[in-house]
Amino acid sequence: MVDDESSIIRKCQKGATEPFKVLVDRYKEKAYFFALSIVGNCEDAHDLSQEAFIKAYRSLKYFKIDYKFSSWFFRILRNLCIDFLRQKKRKKENSTEGYGERPTREIVDMTYSPDSFMQRDELRMLIWEEIQKLREEEREIMICKDIHGMSYEDIAAVMEIPKGTVASTLHKARKKLKERLARHL
């Protein structure tokens, strides 16, 4: 897959636009859910993931072929999400609108039993609330690994931290989450 991506990127670096659609198709779903896990809003996640693809395409001339595209791309997306949240926070601080609002999260469950649906929904909400209480770095690493299935190497590259820090932070975050959930269950 990496060789395939390298050839696609080389074509794009020479001015072709069509091959980039392959990369968009390959990463658009992961990008959306990655952004959603950071910003917590469907529309914003959609907009930010699209913006990241545009920014990545425009910056391909700076991309080093020996680097992993997905790590580079998700770093761009992560930075856009963080900038977006900072701007949103500044706007909120300068305004009284939105006080007390919580971001909504869509939870999809294909089970038809109302009882099991409610129990699963409540458990998911509890887990998500406890994840949100983790430190930002812990939360982000946990979501990257456990929800998005990213490797330690990819997380380290996206967050620009050592792989060992990823592993130790993830271990601590999982331990905290387990302890917090044990109190509720």
Image (cartoon, helix red, strand yellow):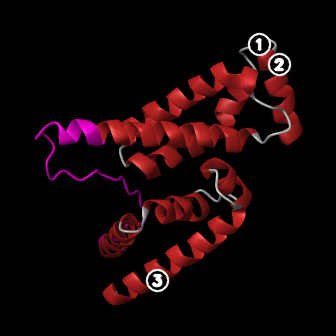
Q: Residues within 10 Å of mark 3 (few under 14, many from 20)?
A: few
* Residue type highlighted by circle 3: Lys
> Would you place residue 145 above or below residue 177 in this image?
above
**Element at badge 3?**
helix
Is 106 contained in the magenta span?
A: yes
Q: Where is residue 141 in the image (x, y as percent from the top left)?
A: 56, 61
Q: Residues within 10 Å of mark 2 (few under 14, many from 20)?
A: some
Q: Gap between marks 1 and 3, in whole Å?
A: 49 Å
In-front residue for pair 166/46: 166
Give the main secondary structure, helix, strand or loop, of the magenta stretch: loop
- The image quadrant of residue 109 is bottom left
Apparent side of residue 150 relative to residue 3 in the rendered image (left or right): left
* Residue type highlighted by circle 1: Ala
Residue identifier under label 3: 178
Q: Earlier in the sequence, mark 3 or mark 2?
A: 2
Question: What label sits on residue 16 in the rendered view?
Answer: 1
Residue identifier under label 2: 11
Tags 2 and 1 in contact by the CB under 8 Å rule?
yes
* Residue occupying the point 50% across, 66% down: 138
**Element at badge 1?**
loop
Q: Position of residue 18 (x, y in %)?
A: 73, 16
Span shown in magenta: 89-114
Q: Position of residue 23 (x, y in %)?
A: 70, 32
> Would you place residue 46 above or below residue 10 in this image?
below
Q: How crowded is mark 1: few (under 14 residues within 10 Å), some or many (20 or more)?
A: few
* Residue occupying the point 54% across, 65% down: 142
Tags 1 and 3 in contact by the CB under 8 Å rule?
no
* Residue occupying the point 36% across, 52% down: 106
Apparent side of residue 51 relative to residue 43 in the rendered image (left or right): right
Apparent side of residue 147 relative to residue 123 in the rendered image (left or right): right
Apparent side of residue 114 relative to residue 138 in the rendered image (left or right): left
